[in-house]
């Protein structure tokens, strides 16, 4: 007829092989790792080491904000003296901070 067939043009050759599309994704992942994942792993490792090093006489703060002195250390629980003759049992995971010696006396 009067109208000729239209054929699609050959696709343009990408000299980078499509790698340029993935570079922003890779950069975001690297930033995510160094800004979020790595510091969190470091904090968890420090917390684990602190919990393993707890011993009788250490002064601690629990997640509930209780300040006390360690009286007894078991595998999963710690006995904490929060007042004179008042001892409570706390899970090791509930310990957030190890205080320097003598902190309780200064409060």
Image: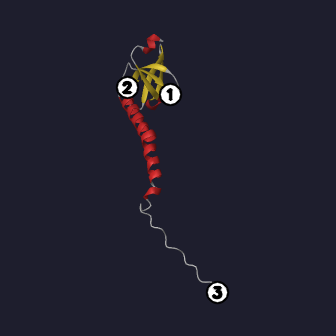
Q: Position of residue 37 (x, y in %)?
A: 44, 41
- Taking depth in this image into account, of 55 and 61 the one nearest to the observer is 61
CB contact under 8 Å: marks 3 and 1: no
Alpha carbon separation for disc pair 1 and 2: 16 Å
- Taking depth in this image into account, of 54 and 99 the one nearest to the observer is 99
Looking at the image, is mark 1 or mark 2 earlier in the sequence?
2
| Residue tagged 1 | 63
| Residue tagged 3 | 2
Q: Position of residue 14 (x, y in %)?
A: 44, 64
Quadrant in which residue 34 is drawn = top left
| Residue tagged 2 | 54
- Taking depth in this image into account, of 66 and 7 the one nearest to the observer is 7
Alpha carbon separation for disc pair 3 and 1: 84 Å
SS state under label 2: loop
SS state under label 1: loop
Looking at the image, is mark 3 or mark 1 earlier in the sequence?
3
Image point (44%, 11%), residue name? 105
Alpha carbon separation for disc pair 3 and 2: 91 Å
Image point (41%, 34%), residue name? 43
Q: Position of residue 86 (x, y in %)?
A: 49, 17
Image point (48%, 25%), residue name? 62
Image height check: is 28 above or below 3? Answer: above
Q: Nearer the viewer, mark 3 or mark 1?
A: 3
Looking at the image, is mark 3 or mark 2 earlier in the sequence?
3
Number of residues whose C-alpha sits closer than 10 Å to that of mark 1, classed few (under 14), some (14–19) or many (20 or more)? few
Number of residues whose C-alpha sits closer than 10 Å to that of mark 2, classed few (under 14), some (14–19) or many (20 or more)? some
Residue lying at the far front of the rendered structure: 2
Image height check: is 9 above or below 15? Answer: below
Task: Quarter of the image for the N terminus: give it.
Answer: bottom right
Residue 8 appears left or right of 37? right
Q: Nearer the viewer, mark 3 or mark 2?
A: 3
């Amino acid at each position: 007829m009067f109208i000729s067939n239209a054929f699609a043009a050959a696709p343009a050759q990408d000299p980078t092989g499509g790698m340029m599309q993935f570079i922003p994704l890779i950069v975001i992942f690297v930033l995510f790792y160094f800004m979020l994942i790595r510091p969190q792993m470091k904090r968890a490792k420090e917390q684990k080491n602190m919990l393993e090093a707890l011993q009788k006489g250490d002064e601690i703060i629990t997640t509930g904000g209780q300040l006390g002195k360690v009286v007894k250390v078991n595998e999963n629980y710690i006995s904490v003296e929060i007042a004179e003759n008042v001892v409570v049992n706390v899970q090791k995971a509930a310990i957030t901070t190890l205080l320097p010696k003598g902190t309780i006396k200064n409060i």
